Image (spheres, rainbow, N blue to C red):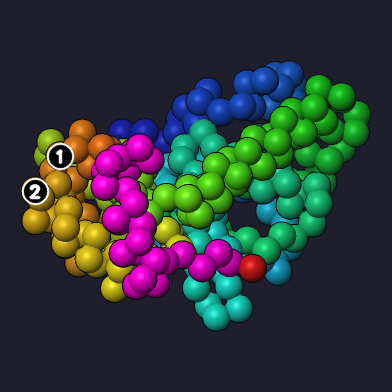
């Protein structure tokens, strides 16, 4: 999938220009991109499962999510990756992790040759330091997601994830979160019934419009207020969320 009038190579260059690859020597970037494999995926396609052979690359188009799965089969999203975001450096260094990667919308990626990346990192300390910084960024992002899952109410987490996703698409002047209610429940670590109640409250307040596979955000500013951790009504929301199936962190 490419934008109208652009090639995959042009989209890849734009993604690289928005990425941390610019911190690398130009020769290392060229070496990584030479032989990178183009992957085009439809919505809800699995790029990587937790026991699969490690893969690493850059998101060129679309949106993908990194998630964990509990023994009961519930999902919790730990990261959304957009064009220019790097995937898989940690598993490339440390081996398979208990995470999976799937597309949210139609997406395109360029997958690196991990053997080439390892050789570059061993030969050039600047590449090795870049990999260490990339892994550290992922750690901090994961800690932020964990804090959001544990300390915010379901209502706040739903608002936060909707705004996070909706930056990717628009329907006229409205923001669109291309996600169904079950996937949204998985993303925020809750159950569909609780998420449906939160969406119903947002809909009644004129903040969103719900469709089968998408949620239209009608008032982003007010929805952002709903995601704030210092709202006066947070304690009552949090209590209600916990009484009806709050988050169960994945193991």
State the image coordinates of residue 208 (x, y, percent, origin top left): 15, 50
Q: Reply above or below: 138 against 241.
A: above
- The residue that appears at 62% across and 21% down in the rendered structure is 22
- The residue that appears at 64% across and 68% down in the rendered structure is 251
Res. 192 image quadrant: bottom left
Q: Report which residue position mark 1 lands on.
A: 219
Q: Residues within 10 Å of mark 2 (few under 14, many from 20)?
A: some
Q: Report which residue position mark 2 lands on.
A: 206
- Residues under numbered marks 2 and 1 in contact, where contact means CB atoms less than 8 Å apart: yes
Q: Is residue 64 left or right of residue 174?
A: right
CA gap between label 2 and label 1 equals 7 Å
State the image coordinates of residue 214 (x, y, percent, origin top left): 23, 58
- Pick whichever, 104 or 68, lies toward us: 68
Q: Which secondary structure lies at badge 1? A: loop
Instruction: Give the residues drawn in magenta, as a range.
Output: 226-250
Residue 26 on the magenta segment: no
- Pick whichever, 15 or 35, lies toward us: 15
Res. 106 image quadrant: bottom left
Q: Residue furthest bottom?
A: 72
State the image coordinates of residue 46 (x, y, percent, origin top left): 52, 65
Q: Which secondary structure lies at badge 2? A: loop
- Pick whichever, 237 or 12, lies toward us: 237
Query: Does residue 12 appear in the picture of this structure?
Result: no
Q: Is residue 59 left or right of residue 97?
A: left
Q: Is residue 218 left or right of residue 85?
A: left
Q: Is residue 98 left or right of residue 8?
A: right
State the image coordinates of residue 64 (x, y, percent, origin top left): 47, 51
């Amino acid at each position: 999938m490419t934008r109208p009038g652009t090639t995959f190579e042009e989209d890849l260059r734009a993604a690289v220009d928005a990425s941390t690859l610019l911190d690398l020597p130009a020769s290392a970037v060229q070496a990584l991109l030479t032989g990178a494999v183009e992957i085009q995926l439809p919505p809800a396609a699995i790029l990587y499962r937790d026991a699969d052979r490690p893969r690493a690359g850059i998101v060129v188009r679309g949106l993908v999510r990194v998630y964990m799965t509990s023994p009961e089969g519930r999902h919790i999203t730990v990261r959304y990756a957009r064009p220019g975001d790097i995937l898989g450096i940690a598993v490339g260094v440390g081996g398979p992790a208990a995470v999976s990667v799937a597309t949210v919308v139609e997406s395109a990626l360029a997958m690196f040759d991990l053997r080439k990346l390892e050789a570059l990192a061993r030969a050039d300390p600047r590449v090795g330091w870049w990999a260490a910084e990339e892994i550290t960024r992922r750690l901090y992002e994961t800690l932020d997601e964990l804090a959001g899952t544990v300390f915010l109410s379901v209502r706040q987490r739903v608002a936060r994830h909707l705004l996070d996703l909706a930056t990717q698409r628009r329907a006229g002047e409205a923001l669109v979160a291309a996600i169904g209610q079950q996937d949204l429940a998985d993303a925020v670590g809750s159950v569909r019934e609780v998420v449906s109640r939160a969406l119903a409250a947002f809909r009644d307040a004129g903040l969103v419009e719900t469709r089968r596979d998408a949620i239209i955000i009608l008032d982003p500013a007010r929805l952002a207020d709903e995601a704030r951790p210092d709202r006066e009504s947070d304690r009552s929301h949090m209590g209600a969320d916990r009484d009806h199936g709050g988050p169960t962190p994945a193991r």
